[in-house]
Amino acid sequence: MVDVVDKKTRSRMMSGIRSENTKPEIVSRKALHHLGYRFRLGSRIGKIKPDIVLSKYKVAIFTHGCYWHQHKGCKLAYSDRSYSKEWLKKFSDNKARDESVTNQLLDKGWRVVILWECVTRKEDIFIKKISQLDKWIKNNKKDYIEFG
Ligand SMILES: [Zn+2]
């Protein structure tokens, strides 16, 4: 497997990832920042508040917890088997909201990225995915992608 980023970039990315705070959105912000992306925290697109807004590229990034957003086929999504009716309702509400938010942004001409939590948990996988994301932001014409 050929390195997709050079040594210097890799070590900068690693130092960004090796943080005590491993929350997916924080890890992702750091990695993108190290790749040279600039963004302000708490940016909104209308009423929608993505985790990261790259205005220059018209890209909105959401980091989704695998459990709360029920990442399909993901181990982290199914760790709790004692789902009550209320939980199932909550999950389906979350899913409906995610879809609606994505569609609203796509309608406005934004590109949408979903970064699943499980991708941010392992350094080697994360580095690979982040560099794929980097390429996608700069080159891809598609308007929606998930990394999970
Ligand atoms: Zn997942």
Image (cartoon, rainbow, N blue to C red):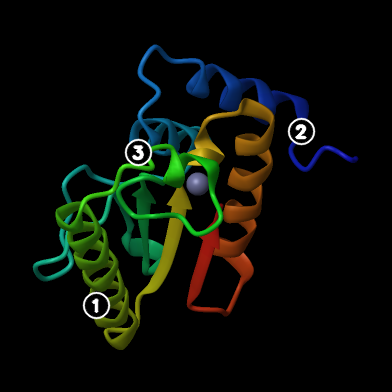
Residue bearing the label numbered 1: 100
Question: Which mark is nearer the camera, 3 or 1?
Answer: 1
Query: Left or right: where does residue 1 sit relative to residue 22?
Result: right
Question: Which mark is nearer the camera, 2 or 1?
Answer: 1
Residue at (51% x, 16% y) in the render? 18
Residues at discs 2 and 1 in contact (Cβ within 8 Å): no
Residue 6: mark: 2
Relative to residue 113, is residue 107 depicted above or below? Answer: below
How much space separates mark 3 and mark 1, taking CA atoms?
Answer: 21 Å
- Which secondary structure lies at badge 3? helix
Residue bearing the label numbered 3: 25
Residue at (69% x, 42% y) in the render? 128
Relative to residue 146, is residue 24 depicted above or below? Answer: above
Q: Quadrant of the N terminus?
A: top right
The furthest residue to the right: 1
Question: Which mark is nearer the camera, 3 or 2?
Answer: 3
* Dot 3 or dot 1, earlier in sequence: 3
**Amino acid type shown at disc 2:** Asp
